[in-house]
Image: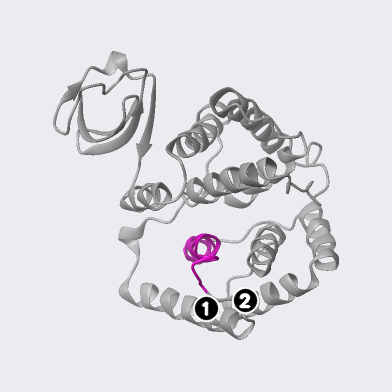
């Protein structure tokens, strides 16, 4: 049995079992239920585990400005990758992918959707391509949104960039935490010097960029060189020179302060994100 922690609507609730929280979904699952009530496990059609305090905060963060059905759809896409493709991801993708799907939907509705500048990823990243292709089907089935097939590249880059495991925050020392905070402050100062600041209009994109930066600083190890990602980086450097220049300055701060070398897919992702803030 699951115990209700918070009812989100008649079909979805945050539940708890054995001190583990999750998002439970099912038709009429929590109709006339309230906090503390029990739900039989057989009534739950989908269950998304909130694996850490960070994932709980991310879920609450998303609830502020993204409709719940977009959040649960993005979670289903990610769980599909984990369960059916044995694809490990860092937890920040729950925020960044949800954000991407919702805001690209808004652009599609407003006639502002633009095709991706990224090359086709099918040959170089077959697993990520299949995951992203599944994603379009899930989005169509759950949200009744028909994204163009070009969106496969956009979603694929999210998984390419987020592959791996999130560092265990309980193993982080105070010195490491303070070092990460110092780097983030330096990056924020650098963005401010370039006229990129957090305002009411930009706060959603800005906050998500900083969440991504925070997770990126927690990674360990370095990725192998990727010629395809390096080509994408070169293309974006030519297409978005201003955003790429800002990204390069951010990269230099990270290298100088941590010694961590960013891979090309990171540069692709962050250049696109900075370009969105510049716009």
On whether residue 110 falls in the magenta region, the answer is no
**Residue 188 badge:** 1
Give the dominant element type of the magenta stretch: helix, strand or loop.
helix
**Residue 250 badge:** 2
| In this rendering, position of residue 68 left or right of residue 3 | right
Q: Residue extending furthest bottom?
A: 193
Residue 241, image x, y percentages: 80, 72
Callout 2 secondary element: helix
Residue 101, image x, y percentages: 59, 43
The residue positioned 84% from the left and 64% from the top of the image is: 239
Which quadrant, please, contains the N terminus?
A: top left
* In the depicted structure, whether residue 95 falls above or below residue 10: below
* In the depicted structure, whether residue 72 falls above or below residue 238: above
Boundaries of the magenta span: 198-220
Q: Nearer the viewer, mark 1 or mark 2?
A: 1
Q: Residue extending furthest left?
A: 36
On whether residue 212 falls in the magenta region, the answer is yes
Q: Residues within 10 Å of mark 1 (few under 14, many from 20)?
A: some
Distance between the alpha carbons at the discs numbered 1 and 2: 9 Å
Q: Nearer the viewer, residue 90 or 209?
A: 209
The residue positioned 64% from the left and 74% from the top of the image is: 251
Sequence-wise first label, 1 or 2: 1
| In this rendering, position of residue 51 left or right of residue 75 | left
The residue positioned 53% from the left and 83% from the top of the image is: 189
Residue 215, image x, y percentages: 48, 60
Residue 182 in view (yes/no): yes
């Amino acid at each position: 049995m699951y115990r209700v922690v918070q009812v989100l609507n008649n079909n979805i609730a945050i539940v708890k079992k054995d001190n583990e929280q999750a998002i439970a979904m099912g038709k009429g699952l929590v109709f006339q239920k309230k906090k503390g009530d029990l739900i039989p496990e057989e009534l739950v059609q989908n269950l998304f585990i909130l694996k850490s305090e960070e994932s709980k905060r991310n879920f609450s963060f998303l609830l502020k400005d993204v409709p719940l059905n977009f959040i649960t759809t993005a979670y289903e896409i990610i769980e599909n990758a984990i369960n059916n493709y044995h694809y490990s991801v860092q937890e920040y993708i729950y925020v960044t992918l949800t954000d991407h799907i919702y805001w690209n939907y808004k652009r599609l509705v407003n006639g502002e959707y633009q095709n991706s500048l990224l090359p086709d990823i099918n040959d170089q990243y077959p697993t990520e391509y299949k995951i992203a292709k599944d994603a379009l089907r899930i989005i169509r089935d759950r949200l009744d949104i028909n994204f163009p097939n070009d969106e496969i590249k956009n979603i694929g880059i999210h998984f390419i960039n987020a592959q791996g495991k999130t560092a265990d925050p309980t193993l982080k020392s105070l010195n490491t935490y303070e070092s990460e905070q110092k780097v983030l402050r330096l990056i924020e100062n650098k963005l401010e010097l370039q006229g990129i600041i957090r305002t009411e209009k930009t706060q959603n994109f800005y906050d998500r960029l900083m969440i991504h930066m925070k997770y990126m600083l927690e990674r360990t190890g370095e990725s192998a060189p990727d010629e395809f990602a390096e080509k994408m980086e070169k293309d974006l450097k030519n297409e978005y020179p201003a955003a790429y220049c800002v990204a390069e300055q951010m990269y230099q701060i990270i290298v100088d302060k941590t010694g961590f070398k960013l891979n090309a897919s990171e540069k692709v992702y962050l250049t696109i994100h900075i370009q969105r803030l510049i716009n």
